[in-house]
Amino acid sequence: MSTDRDFTLDRQAVRRHARAHAAAALAGRDKPASDPHFLSREVAGRMAERLALIRNQPARILDIGCGTGADFALLAGRYPNASLTGIDLCQALLPRPARSGWLQRMLGSGAGPQSICADAEQLPVRRSSMQMVWSNLMLNWLHDPLPALREMHRVLEVDGMLMFSTLGPDTLRELREALPAGHGERVHRFIDMHDLGDALVKAGFAEPVMDMETLTLTYQDLDGLLRDLRQAGASNASTQRPRGLSGRQGWQAARDRYEQLRRDGRLPATFEIVYGHAWKAAPKTTDDGRAVIQFRKRDK
């Protein structure tokens, strides 16, 4: 389903960057004054606002791309009786067992959330075992989201809901334009909202609802933006990424181009945030293609 067959991601590089992100988090380097995780926290809050408009009380929730489990408290606060399971590709990011006592007290849950290291395209979760799938800024790490969406559909029970956020094509447009063109992918490509809607339907979801908004973060200098991307594990993982930037002259030219965008003493960085939710409807056919006929008692 990928919108560009020439763009693929290096999964080993994704894991490597995630491990660097985990090391930064454990070292306590993400200070409030310059928090590289601000975007994901802000987006999680905006996703939660959308949940407030939906009458749904899931008992079993799967957080795909959970990272350090930062969204667990938000989900537990909204659904205090739900069991939570988090899945992430990087083992180093997952909450450690030694921290589980503190996490359980914060969540107010006796059992606490479970954390599993696994690939979103091969979920170690039983079919129809979840009532809600939550995924905050994970799909943008897949050059083709369709296999993961099919897995999300598989693990949901009928009438279960998928709620997700991802990055759209205008994300980091200033950086893309400032860096020299050619010689490989210098900034990730991101899938358009309409293509994601098509993928949801192909994966079997019903009634997909999509919307988009643009958030602009500002930085004192280009190094601050690059540092936040690096500490958040968001470095370039394209298989076609260049291994250099044409030396010192290339970097200086990029800085000069970005500097032309400075407004009120700050440099902008655009993030296009795509939100979506959809439902798993009752199947019309079985896995082997036979039609499903439902019989309902007729009202007298």
Image (cartoon, rainbow, N blue to C red):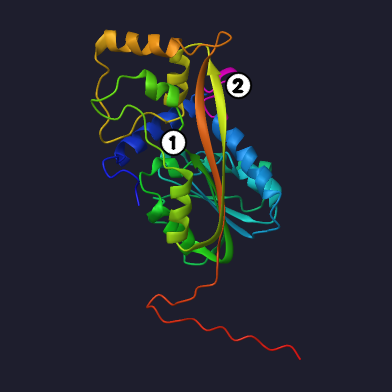
Type of amino acid under label 1? Pro
Place of residue 226 in the rendered image (x, y in percent of width and height, measured from the top left): 42, 20
Q: Which mark is residue 147?
A: none
Marks 1 and 2, the one that precedes in the sequence: 2
Q: Is residue 193 left or right of residue 50?
A: left
Residue 40 seen in the figure? yes
Q: Residue 287, relative to residue 219: is it above or below? A: below
Q: Which mark is residue 32?
A: 2
Place of residue 267 in the rendered image (x, y in percent of width and height, measured from the top left): 51, 14
Determine the image quadrant of residue 275: top right
Q: Which mark is residue 169?
A: 1
Q: Quadrant of the C terminus?
A: bottom right
Q: Which residues are magenta?
A: 29-38
Place of residue 79 in the rendered image (x, y in percent of width and height, measured from the top left): 68, 52
Q: Main secondary structure of the magenta part?
A: loop
Seen at 50% across and 22% down, the residue is: 269
Pointer 1 local density, CA inside 10 Å: few below 14, some 14–19, many at least 20: some
